[in-house]
Amino acid sequence: MAKRASKAVAKTHRRPKHTVAAPLTENDVAFAVRVTDASVNKSIPKGAHAMCAPLEDRVYSGQEFPIGAMLYIERERHGQKEHTLRRVSYIDGEKMRLATHSHQVRYREEIVYPPNPAKEKIRLLGRVKGIFVDI
């Protein structure tokens, strides 16, 4: 009798493309956001994960965050939604400016928060507490 050759099936590990939620304690929930471009490459390299603490879904005055804090935001304008990381660069009373943190000039646009509701909507989804880099 001839023996059949068995084929080894290799399982591939796929990384999730979307946000991953991971409970830290009974009261806390954190999530990770994979950085896919160079808009914050001074702080977080492309391909790394930003570990975020969730924020309540409300309008913030800017006084809750120090200058330099990195936030994960959802920005909606012209019917398109984008998710991005931005650093608090300036606080003036009830307004704050959110900037990229990149070596590349093309990522220099600042966002004013809270925005003009007729032009765009911005939701602050999380505050970056740390990063995870694959080794």
Image (spheres, rainbow, N blue to C red):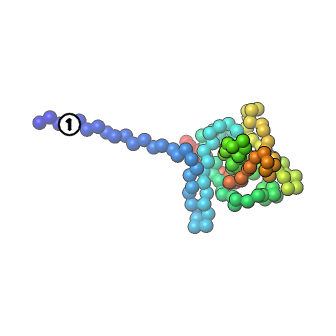
Q: Residues within 10 Å of mark 1 (few under 14, many from 20)?
A: few
Describe the element under mark 1 as helix, strand or loop.
Answer: loop
Q: Quadrant of the C terminus?
A: top right
Q: Residue at x 67, y 44 (%)?
A: 81
Q: Residue at x 65, y 53 (%)?
A: 52
Q: How many numbered circles does the render carry?
A: 1
What amino acid is at disc 1?
Answer: Arg
Q: Find residue 58 and report its horizontal and vertical position in percent.
A: 73, 59
Q: Find residue 78 and report its horizontal and vertical position in percent.
A: 72, 41
Examine the image and state in which quarter residue 34 appears: top right
The residue lying furthest to the left in this view is 1
Position above or below: 74 against 10: below
Q: From this viewpoint, is residue 72 visible?
A: yes
Examine the image and state in which quarter residue 8 appears: top left
Q: Find residue 75 and report its horizontal and vertical position in percent.
A: 71, 46
Q: Which residue is mark 1?
A: 4
Q: From this viewpoint, is residue 42 visible?
A: no
Q: Find residue 14 and report its horizontal and vertical position in percent.
A: 48, 43
Q: Quadrant of the N terminus?
A: top left
Position above or below: 4 against 51: above
Foreground residue among 129 and 116: 116
Q: Is residue 31 left or right of residue 102?
A: left
